[in-house]
Image (cartoon, rainbow, N blue to C red):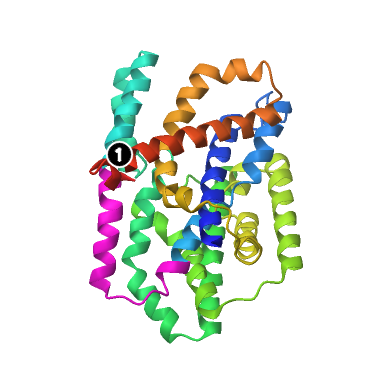
């Protein structure tokens, strides 16, 4: 039950994050709007939902890395679940990019953006996950072997080392502009390496049934979220918002353990959980449509601190209904 709850919490958090990011993502520290009321609202909701993607990766590791099945069976299941969605949604969102470019009157730029985005493994901003997770699946047999043959301390060391390398890399990429060093653009095929820590940690928690000290987890979660909120204002927000920053790693792990222990109750979210992947895939379309049609009118009538969660609920419900309809169609259901 906790897993169903976690998936729904995580996908809703993704929507909140993407709604909030519209108020901060293009505002640099030199911008006069940096630190204004709207910025703080966006920063608050963005900061408290950064755990969303890490929890998706951890729950995949939790259930996949300790599962006993033949490798050929595992890969056959994963290909069926991931290849068709990659092709379908890459095509859909490429068309979406062209439509947006057409509305803006710059169709040529739309074509260029499609080529660039596909080459970077993100036909649309959220689809990077769809290109990253299959590569974690590919190394799953190796990680399963590690979990079954290594000792507890050896596995923990490898997890911590993976997190250390990922966090150092993110820190360097965000500090390097100040050092006059240009970070190199890498292929999307390398992104999964930074998420091995989260993925393997999920399996580690499952195999060794890690006990949770709730007081410590709550303290770590609160402090980590506070560091994210304040650090993103006083320092460089791109680091503190990273899924691989130390503050987000600590918040994600502590929240995963808390949900597993304390929200293992039936909230009747099993159906939404089953369709959470589809909700994740389709939600940017409603986010774009509603932002274009109603964002300004909404903000003129309600406070932004109410707007972001309310808007997120509307996008979530619209996406959920759409995915329910898609799931009723034989061939389209394979895309979600």
For label 1, the crowd category at 10 Å Cα-Cα, with few meaning under 14, some 14 to 19 and many 20 or more, is many
Query: Could you tell whether 237 is left or right of 128 in the image?
Result: right
Task: Give the quarter of the image for residue 111.
Answer: top left
Q: Establish if 212 lies above or below 270.
A: below
Query: Could you tell whether 190 is left or right of 303 in the image?
Result: left
Badge count: 1
The front one of 59 and 43 is 59
Residue span colored magenta: 62-87
Q: Position of residue 41 (x, y in %)?
A: 69, 33
Instruction: Tell me the element at label 1.
Output: helix
Q: Establish if 175 lies above or below 17.
A: below
Q: Establish if 139 lies above or below 192.
A: below
Query: Which SS type dominates the magenta stretch?
Result: helix
Query: Could you tell whether 215 is left or right of 212 in the image?
Result: right
Query: Could you tell whether 57 is left or right of 297 in the image?
Result: left
One can see residue 244 in this view: yes
Q: Position of residue 187 (x, y in %)?
A: 34, 50
Q: Quadrant of the N terminus?
A: bottom right
Q: Is residue 221 magenta?
A: no
One can see residue 184 in this view: no
Residue occupying the far top of the picture: 105
Q: Position of residue 239 (x, y in %)?
A: 60, 48
The residue tagged 1 is 90
Q: Residue at x 54, y 73 (%)?
A: 205
Q: Residue at x 56, y 49 (%)?
A: 9
Q: Residue at x 54, y 80 (%)?
A: 208
Q: Position of residue 331 (x, y in %)?
A: 23, 43
The front one of 257 and 177 is 257
Q: Is residue 74 magenta?
A: yes
């Amino acid at each position: 039950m906790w897993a169903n709850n976690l998936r729904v919490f995580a996908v809703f958090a993704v929507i909140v994050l993407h709604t909030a990011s519209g108020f901060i993502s293009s505002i640099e520290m030199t911008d006069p709007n940096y630190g204004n009321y709207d910025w703080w609202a966006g920063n608050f909701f963005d900061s408290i939902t950064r755990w969303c993607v890490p929890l998706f990766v951890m729950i995949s590791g939790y259930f996949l890395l300790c599962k006993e099945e033949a490798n050929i069976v595992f890969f056959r299941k994963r290909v069926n679940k991931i290849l068709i969605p990659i092709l379908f949604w890459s095509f859909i969102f490429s068309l979406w990019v062209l439509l947006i470019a057409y509305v803006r009157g710059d169709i040529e730029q739309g074509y260029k953006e499609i080529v660039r985005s596909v080459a970077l493994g993100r036909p649309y901003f959220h689809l990077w996950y769809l290109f990253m997770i299959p590569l974690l699946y590919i190394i799953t047999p190796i990680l399963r072997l590690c979990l079954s043959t290594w000792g507890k301390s050896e596995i923990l060391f490898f997890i911590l080392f993976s997190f250390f390398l990922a966090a150092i890399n993110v820190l360097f990429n965000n500090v390097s502009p100040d050092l006059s060093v240009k970070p190199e653009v890498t292929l999307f095929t390398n992104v999964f390496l930074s998420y091995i820590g989260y993925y393997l940690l999920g399996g580690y928690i499952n195999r060794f049934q890690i006990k949770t000290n709730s007081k410590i987890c709550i303290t770590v979660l609160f402090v980590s979220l506070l560091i994210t909120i304040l650090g993103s204002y006083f320092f460089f927000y791109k680091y503190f918002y990273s899924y691989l920053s130390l503050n987000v790693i600590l918040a994600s792990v502590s929240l995963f353990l808390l949900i597993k222990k304390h929200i293992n109750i039936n909230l009747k979210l099993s159906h939404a959980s089953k369709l959470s992947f589809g909700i994740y895939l389709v939600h940017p379309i409603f986010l774009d449509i509603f932002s274009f049609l109603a964002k300004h009118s909404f903000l003129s009538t309600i406070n932004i601190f109410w707007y972001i969660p309310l808007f997120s609920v509307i996008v979530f419900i619209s996406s959920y209904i759409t995915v329910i309809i898609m799931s009723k169609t034989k061939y389209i259901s394979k895309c979600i």
